[in-house]
Image (spheres, rainbow, N blue to C red):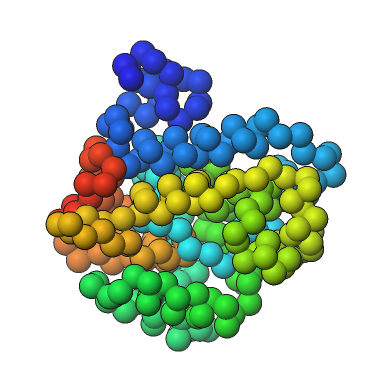
Amino acid sequence: MGRNDNCFCGSGKKRKKCHSYISEDSYIESLYKLYHEIEIIKRDHQYPLEHPCKKGCHECCYDFFSITMLEFEAVLASLKRNGMNYTREIFNIALEYNAFLEKNDPELYNYFERDLTGNDFEEEFYFQRRLYNDRPARLSFPCPLLNKESKSCSVYEDRPFICRTHGNTFNTSTNLYKNNSPTCEYIVDSRDNANYTPEVKDEFYTKMMELNKLVQGEMRSFLLQYPIFYWFKLYKDKNEKYNRDMYESLVPAYFYKKVDSLQPIDIR
């Protein structure tokens, strides 16, 4: 793909005027290609006019969910394109939410603060799920990326996987579908919602998880995931430990290394 070709993200702009700083076949490029595939599926679907998932609804911005480090790197890069002052503002909002959590739910906060380096991913994943399931599905504060005035996402074009698929698509393998659980206050029947939304098949979830792998010799392991608000604190703490600005990337390699080549040494 040349610099004058259309950008891989689907913006319609030339690569040199869009994501010129991202190397071909890198983790970030692969992530955006996956995002673009999902957007095409939704674009080609005929949603009913009364479907609640539309611009202006921010119900799921209060939901309790985690994202990968790769997704957060895309979010962070998007914020920085809007200027460092704006990025600091978002960091400060997220840090306030972390302080609130530390005071009101120390068990969960202390879990996030633990050094989980080297821990078994599957074991930690299910432990984290149990912690989440023991709590309300919604937080008392919104995602720090939610613009409270416009009620819209401040990094909409770069938002994470779950933010693109929750409510406006379905997948028969998810517990939400299997248990016919309410998706949100406005979508109380997940299986009925499948009649009005396109399917995002298992292969998309598999691709997403493949991008979250770390290479250690012949072994492959998954990186842990955290809520968006906690990623901000983790980045602040790790960067300040080494006298870097809190908004510096912790994995610059995501922007130039090819998929299935990320090693522990690549994480700062």
* Relative side of 84 to 179, left or right: left
Q: Residue placed at 64% from the left, 56% from the top?
A: 172
Q: Image quadrant for the C terminus?
A: bottom left
Residue 17 sits in which quadrant?
A: top left
In this orientation, does residue 262 appear? yes
Q: Image quadrant for the N terminus?
A: top left
Q: Position of residue 116 (x, y in %)?
A: 29, 75
Considering every residue shown, the one lying at the far bottom of the view is: 107
Q: Position of residue 72 (x, y in %)?
A: 40, 52
Q: Position of residue 78 (x, y in %)?
A: 42, 41
Q: Residue placed at 74% from the left, 51% from the top?
A: 194
* Relative side of 140 to 195, left or right: left
Height in image: 26 above or below 177? above
In this orientation, does residue 150 appear? no
Considering every residue shown, the one lying at the far top of the view is: 4
Height in image: 240 above or below 30? below
* Relative side of 102 to 162, left or right: left
Q: Position of residue 66 (x, y in %)?
A: 48, 63
| Relative depth, front residue between 5 and 213 | 213
Height in image: 142 above or below 24? below
Considering every residue shown, the one lying at the far right of the view is: 50
Q: Residue placed at 50% from the left, 75% from the top?
A: 129
| Relative depth, front residue between 87 and 25 | 25
Looking at the image, how many numbered discs can be counted on the residues? 0
